[in-house]
Image (cartoon, rainbow, N blue to C red):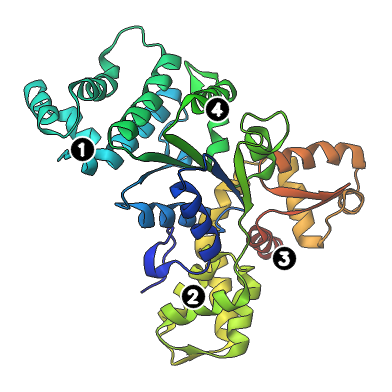
Amino acid sequence: MTFTMLPVKGKNFIDRKEIVTEIINTLCDKQIFMGFALYGIRRVGKSSIFIEVQRRLDGNGFVVPVYVNAWDLTEETVPEFIRVLRNAIIDAYSPRLGLKYKAEELLQLPIKFFRDTMKSATISVTLGEDIEAILKWGEREGIDYNHLIDEVFNLAENLAKETDTRCALLIDEFPSLIELKLNGKKVGEPIIKKIRTIQERKKHVIISISGSIRKTLDLVAISSGSAFYKQLILREIKPLEPEYTKKLIKENLGGEATNDAYDRIHELSSGIPFYIQAIGKKLRELKKDIINIEDVDNAFDTFLGEEGTLIFRQQFKQLSPKERLIVKTMARNEVYSLSKIARAMKENPTNIGWFLNDLEDKGVLIKEGPGRYRFMDPIFKKWLHQKTS
């Protein structure tokens, strides 16, 4: 095994046994018709959990997992979301149907070969026509995208019904669908409500979602006025415990490390798998027989200066000048209450409060209590501290 910056699965998947088992057992229970809503900070491993669930369910006989990451959309538009979801559903069911091609490959086939392929698959004529219609929607004139969303979910329902399976849609970073646009106009909120309404009518399709920004997830699944309120099982995904940080490093390092070194890796990474992997990658490059605490400190500083800058610089640039000044002040002065931030900036707390709310909306800060905030990503804070020291 080796360290990776991508979501992991299989042997590289560390811990999370309980949540993965719970999701799989729930999705496989024919008497339960509820999905999950996973929430936790960015890079804590939500995608890895969904991908591991997908891996373990593939070919299990009853549940067909369909994984989509809303952050992977090339455009934040309704047509792009429909295209990605449609392709993921067809691709997930292709092995069950005896189809030799993925969705995008089917689109490239001449119409005669396409229809011959549909005839050779183990599906009804009607379902073959449904697949053709949903694949060829781009050729229609005057497309009704609201109706097209219905068609995509109907396809999932009909595929599941015909194959006697349950279609488990795993939609990563689901709340970001709020940003979906149609003809330049934001329509994400009604689209999410529509998906909720469609879901109510399906007997073979279950949706599970994840979200990194708690405040945004509130809008779609947690608050009493949200579309999926009480429709999903809520689970918070927390950073790894020290024992699993050590296990992840030991299994990939290619050498040994002192106990102090393992402790420091956990401290610096805050137990977030992505950053554990990043530090481990730097340490592995040293090719030392025994890693010590100084090696860990140097590796972390190198990561912050190199990959950390690539990760965080764009996020920092997207903030307004005032927001940048606030987060820099918080990181440099270790101040987290509204009054102390305002005092450090020599400004009126009322003025600062508006910007803190915006930073919470953007997923930079988390409000812990009245007038008190913390960084959602503790490593972003450490990067800011390094850059402002």
Which residue is painted at 87% across and 37% down in the image? 351
Which residue is painted at 51% across and 65% down in the image? 17
Of badges 1 and 3, the one in the foreground is 1
The three-letter amino acid code for the residue at tag 3 is: Ser
Of badges 2 and 3, the one in the foreground is 2
What is the x, y in percent for residue 218?
68, 38
Residue under pointer 1: 97
Residue under pointer 2: 248
In the rendering, which numbered label is found on residue 389? 3
Of mark 3 and mark 4, the one earlier in the sequence is 4
Residues tagged 1 and 3 counted as in contact (Cβ below 8 A): no
Of mark 1 and mark 3, the one earlier in the sequence is 1
Mark 4: secondary structure:
helix
* Residue 140 visible here: yes
Of badges 2 and 4, the one in the foreground is 4
Within 10 Å of disc 1 (Cα), the crowding (few <14, some 14-19, many 20+) is some
Of mark 2 and mark 3, the one earlier in the sequence is 2
Distance from the alpha carbon under mark 1 to that under mark 3: 60 Å
Of mark 1 and mark 4, the one earlier in the sequence is 1
Of mark 1 and mark 2, the one earlier in the sequence is 1
Residue under pointer 4: 196
Task: Indicate left or right for 344 with 359 as reference.
Answer: right
Residues tagged 2 and 4 counted as in contact (Cβ below 8 A): no
Which residue is painted at 64% across and 58% down in the image? 380
For this rendering, which residue is in front, 261 or 219? 219
What is the x, y in percent for residue 113?
7, 27
Distance from the alpha carbon under mark 2 to that under mark 4: 38 Å
